[in-house]
Image: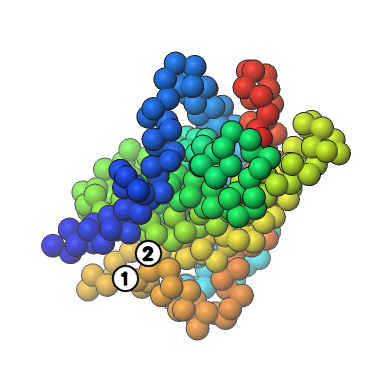
């Protein structure tokens, strides 16, 4: 019963994003479903290009991401050991788990970006059209912000199971090193999905879905909105060139990290938690996690991992957007605008 009620609660939370009519997903999914011929080919081509670009970006910056996640998990109730900064944590992972430990969880992380980045990047363009038509230069800042939040939320709603596995695989190395686990809980991505489904049911695949969706919405508010706006400015100086893409990417990474870090902390902690012997959970949701974190560790604990988050999002945006823009130009799609 508890699994069924939990699934029902999460489904109700996701309905605004996924409903067939009137939901936030209707603009994006409707546009994709109705596309035929050249339009469908263009969407498919963009989807493939975003997949390639996001895989490159994720692979290049993953060690920073796992370090950020471990920083966010230290300080929780039951945490034992000294608190570390970014470089100390990075060195600790490499020393205790080897270089391979810096890439623990990379398979679900890369797999996640195929649907996630594909839907958010393509969805942003389609949703923005609902506000300004075919001319993106007419889009206001509010329209761009609404498009970024909506596209990010829809994309993350699709990709939550991959994100859940990624966070747990990242956290397992820390638990093994501390002696709390004999070995990692999952051997690989497939084993993780099977194990979670058997032990927690389908609802377990969406543990932490709301903080994950909130975090993604805020990331894309900072990322897509900023990149779109910054590129519009820098293109007047450098033209639609590599320099323009670099400058817009740097701005995008900073604001994405600034907007999303508190939600990222909550997402990491909620997804990583396991049920106690009595079946209870440490955090009931995002707000409960924030309240307990602030009470136990102070306000700035909500920004744990901001520096590595920025250090990751900055290079991630740089690699992704420069790769994506080049691929779009080389394949005849044209630059992002």
Residue 307 left/right relative to 66: right
Callout 1: helix, strand or loop?
Answer: loop
Callout 2: helix, strand or loop?
Answer: loop
Give the x, y percent position of residue 263: 51, 63
Sequence-first disc among 1 and 2: 2
Considering the image in quadrants, where does the C terminus appear?
top right
Up-down relation of residue 32 to residue 333 (above or below): below
Up-down relation of residue 89 to residue 82 (above or below): above
Q: Residue at x 46, y 79 (%)?
A: 291
Q: Quadrant of residue 236?
A: top right
Q: Residues within 10 Å of mark 1 (few under 14, many from 20)?
A: few
Up-down relation of residue 55 to residue 149 (above or below): above
Q: Residue at x 60, y 49 (%)?
A: 144
Residue 281: assigned label: 1
Give the x, y percent position of residue 286: 43, 68
Residue 161 left/right relative to 71: left
User: Outermost residue, right direction?
Assistant: 237
Q: CA distance from mark 1 to mark 2?
A: 7 Å
The reply to whether the C-beta atoms of the residues labelled 1 and 2 are less than 8 Å apart is yes
Residue 273: assigned label: 2
The image shows a total of numbered marks equal to 2
């Amino acid at each position: 019963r508890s699994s069924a009620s939990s699934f029902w609660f999460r489904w109700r939370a996701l309905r605004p994003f996924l409903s067939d009519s009137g939901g936030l997903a209707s603009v994006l999914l409707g546009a994709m479903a109705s596309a035929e011929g050249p339009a469908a080919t263009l969407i498919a081509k963009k989807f493939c290009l975003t997949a390639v670009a996001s895989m490159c970006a994720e692979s290049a910056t993953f060690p920073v991401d796992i370090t950020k996640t471990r920083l966010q998990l230290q300080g929780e109730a039951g945490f034992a050991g000294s608190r570390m900064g970014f470089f100390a944590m990075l060195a600790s992972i490499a020393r205790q788990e080897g270089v391979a430990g810096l890439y623990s969880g990379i398979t679900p992380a890369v797999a996640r970006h195929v649907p996630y980045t594909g839907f958010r990047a393509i969805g942003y363009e389609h949703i923005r059209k609902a506000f300004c038509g075919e001319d993106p230069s007419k889009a206001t800042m509010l329209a761009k912000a609404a498009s970024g939040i909506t596209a990010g939320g829809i994309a993350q709603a699709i990709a939550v199971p991959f994100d859940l596995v990624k966070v747990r695989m990242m956290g397992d190395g820390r638990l093994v090193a501390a002696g709390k686990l004999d070995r990692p809980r999952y051997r690989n991505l497939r084993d993780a999905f099977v194990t979670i489904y058997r032990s927690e049911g389908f609802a377990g695949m969406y543990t932490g879905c709301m903080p994950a969706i909130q975090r993604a919405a805020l990331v894309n508010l900072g990322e897509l909105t900023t990149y779109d706006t910054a590129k519009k400015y820098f293109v007047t100086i450098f033209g639609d060139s590599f320099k323009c893409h670099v400058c817009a990417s740097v701005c995008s990474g900073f604001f994405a990290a600034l907007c999303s870090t508190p939600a990222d902390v909550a997402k990491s902690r909620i997804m990583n938690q396991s049920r106690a012997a009595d079946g209870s959970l440490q955090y009931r949701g995002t707000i409960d996690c924030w309240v307990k974190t602030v009470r136990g560790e102070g306000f700035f604990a909500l920004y744990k991992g901001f520096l590595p988050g920025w250090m990751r999002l900055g290079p991630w945006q740089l690699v992704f957007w420069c790769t994506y823009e080049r691929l779009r130009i080389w394949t005849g799609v044209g630059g992002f605008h």
